[in-house]
Image: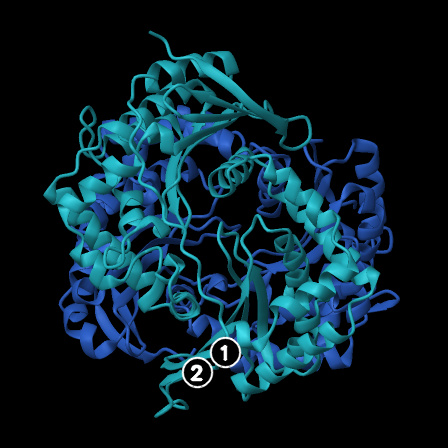
Amino acid sequence: MMSSWQLEAEAPAGRGVTARRFRLDNGLGLITAIDRRAPIVALQTWYRVGSRHEKFGATGMAHLFEHLMFGQTESLPPGEFDRLVERTGGESNAATWVDWTYYRLSLPTRDLPLGIRLEAERMQRLVLEHTPVEAERDVVTNERRERVEDDVDGWLDEQLMAQAFTAHPYRWPTIGWMEDIRALSLPDIRAFYRTWYAPNNATLVCVGDFDEAALLDLVASSYGKIEPATLPEVARIVEPEQLRERVVRAPKPIATDRLLIGYKAPGQDDRDWAVLEIVATLLAGCPSARLYRRLVIEKELASSVDAQLTPFRDPSLLRLAVTAARGHRADEILAVIDSELAQMAAQPPVKAEVEKAKAIAETDFWTSLVDVDGKAEALGHYETALGDFRKVSELAERLAAVTVEDVARVVRSYLNASRRTIVIAEPESEAAGEDGEED
Amino acid sequence: MPPVVIIEPSVDTPLVWFDVAIRGGASADPRGIEGLHRHAALLARRGAGRRDRAELDETLDSLGAAVDISVSRDAVTLSGLALSRHLDAVVELAADILAEPRWSEDEHARLLRETPQVLDEIRDDDSALATRWFDWVCTPGHAYGRTSLGTETSIARIERTAAMELWRREVVADNLVVGLAGDIDEATAARVVARLVERLPTRPRPEVVLEMPAAPSTGRRVILVDKPDRTQAQLRIGHLSIRYGHEDTAAIAVAEAILGGMFSSRLMQEIRVKRGWSYGAGCGLRRSRLPHWFEIWTAAGIDVAGPAVALTLELFAEYAANGPTDDEVDFARSYLVGSMPFHVATARQRMQLAVRDAVFDLPAGFTARLPEALGALAAADVRAACLRCLRPEATVTVAVTTADLARPALEAANAGTLTVVDHDEY
């Protein structure tokens, strides 16, 4: 019997594009958005499983699947998945983060049925055997070497999360700790697949030039008979309030000090998240931003400064990344950051400054929706991390509504030294004997 | 002469992108003053017309706009992004940068202090460092061996007056390629282009003569860039090959896809899938106006760096000599033709490809028509192009890794004479 679709929601997803969410009987979500500007489609499958769903001691499991899912299935021999996609001119890739894993296919419109067939196949019939798993384990350890062990920015990022979080699973890296990656067992890998890779834990997002009715029929016939899984209850882990500044320093083979500072920030669905996004822009998100001007241009203490608010479901971090200029040290930079934040808290920015950040946010919003892949990523992220794709537009509205008073309030509430973690990488020759942690 | 103008309207967002490419680029830097084009362009961006740097930044940011500078071997490009309701104001600022930079003494001095620190950031990044060294050592005497950033020594030699003279000489309407894309109609685009160039000199564009080696280099070489505490070797292997637009361009596009341009390519399968030695491996011809490098890249665990180089060279030699099979050519052609819609899906992509073709002095639509050329290729054409354009006997290998650990295996890799250099000496 053919499964039936329920239309659950619809909302604009850019100029002239409407996104609609449907649900199949077995729980599979499907978001469609028709954009006929090119004869292509972005087909993405978002699973509500990321590194936060892993167990302590088995980190890196979610990310390992980002690799394994391109392997053998019951009907596809090894390598066939990529060959089928590439023969069309399409591309495939995947990404894993704390709250989700998603699989991306970019296909010519005529090959959308192939994409649906491949995604349905690997959702239920992935073959997990010793030899291919070991091969991908080696690849992942090399990926980790390239992105963390031999990359100072990767190391800083990993250390920041490990120090800033003491209870929440955001404390371990998405790629996993090296010893965990090496120890993941085949039975545990198979169990992870059976647990999380199921229609009721996934949302397909299809954006581009396609016939919606035909797609609904195709997805229903390809996925309708897949049984939903019994999804485990995900424990709600609340990170204890941070009461003291945490500092870690380590020597690295680098030219000058590098700092990564993380201030505790709310989850992306919190009303203050949009305000902090504006604050991040005011601090280091544009050439006229306060910290950029102070640290890079006026005082020449730093060669670069960047601010990023992580878009996580649960409370996370507003991060400031700074590279020290030659002859200057991390402590000088920290003093300027503290001074600037104190000034911002004491004397709120004028309205024009906040309006500037809002104009930049408006440009960024539209830039994220330029192509079909970008639209699909935005829809998939908000649907998967926050439970509703319509929050793409809601966030834009929240950003546009931020006031000077909002900015002053969140700077006082969140950007305190006691709520921050600092990781500093120092040149090896200058850091002898300074390795360690301060608290 | 007016500039070459490319317009790609699209109303899917309220954004307009514009690129103003100034032909010349880093390969035209005077010998010993490498980095001059970059310096001149960044300095021009730091204050123009009636605004100093801070005022220019503040005005652009307040409009939610950006005007950025990029420097390639072949062009300096001023790239703008604006909400369409602010387009006129942003174009006015870009026109100031093109026509009336302030050439601030303070900003000149600050930029001279800043640029060496960009070198530091590259030295901290193994992949960027490998590419920088590979560019330098691949083909001595080739203009593309010039670093766009400069060296500590060459940066120190840059004078403000030289930057001003370069801008005066090269920023003339005849030397520009202007591309516009997004929420803009033809009439507005014409007005914008006129505004961008109306204060620029009308004299002919300057002739640019670039250095080329008298003869291609021969023999294999290895440059081991020694950096402490590495767990991997960042590897670049390649040689001077053809220019983008050469009659073998389509055939080499197929050849590079088969060797290292897809996940199912030979390098990816042999190095990553079969052996797990690396997260990835690929290859490609650098797209440029003059003959440029054919380059293979991977990053292998330090314990397998030597075997990875040996295997790569073996695969490359076999491929150059025998070329791909008929089935491989059929597959790659299908991939490349099918992938073209993804490269031209947005107005901005179409504009940027057309601007690049114009900077390379290629016929209009050259890249967009590549699928036709690909369709006409026979497998024998690709094999013949491999023989002509791939030179495994003349490869340069750059390995950024820890010499103590990797040197013996690299010496045994049949990759040629090995020289060890320190990671921060260039």
Name the quarter where the C terminus of chain B is drawn.
bottom left
Q: Residues within 10 Å of mark 2 (few under 14, many from 20)?
A: few
Q: Give the residue drawn at x 62%, y 32%.
A: A13
Tell me residue A160's x, y (percent): 43, 69
Tag 2 and tag 1, C-beta contact below 8 Å: yes
As drawn, the chain in cyan is A
In the rendered structure, the answer to whether residue B24 lies left or right of residue B242 reads: right
Q: Label 1's element?
A: loop
Q: Which mark is residue A163?
A: none
Pointer 2: what residue?
Answer: A439
Q: Are marks 2 and 1 on the same chain?
A: yes
**Quadrant of the rendered structure where residue B223 is?**
bottom left
Q: Residue furthest top?
A: A1
Chain B is shown in which shade? blue
- Work out whether residue B318 can be spotted: no
Closest to the observer, A122 or A318: A318
Tell me residue B115's x, y (percent): 58, 76
CA distance separating discs 2 and 1: 6 Å
In the rendered structure, the answer to whether residue A154 lies left or right of residue A369 reads: left
Q: Give the residue drawn at x 28%, y 43%.
A: A65
Closest to the observer, A185 or B245: A185
Pointer 1: what residue?
Answer: A245
Looking at the rendered structure, the kind of residue marked 1 is: Glu
Q: Label 2's element?
A: loop
Q: Which label's residue is closer to the chain start, 2 or 1?
A: 1
Looking at the rendered structure, the kind of residue marked 2 is: Asp
Tell me residue B261's x, y (percent): 35, 42
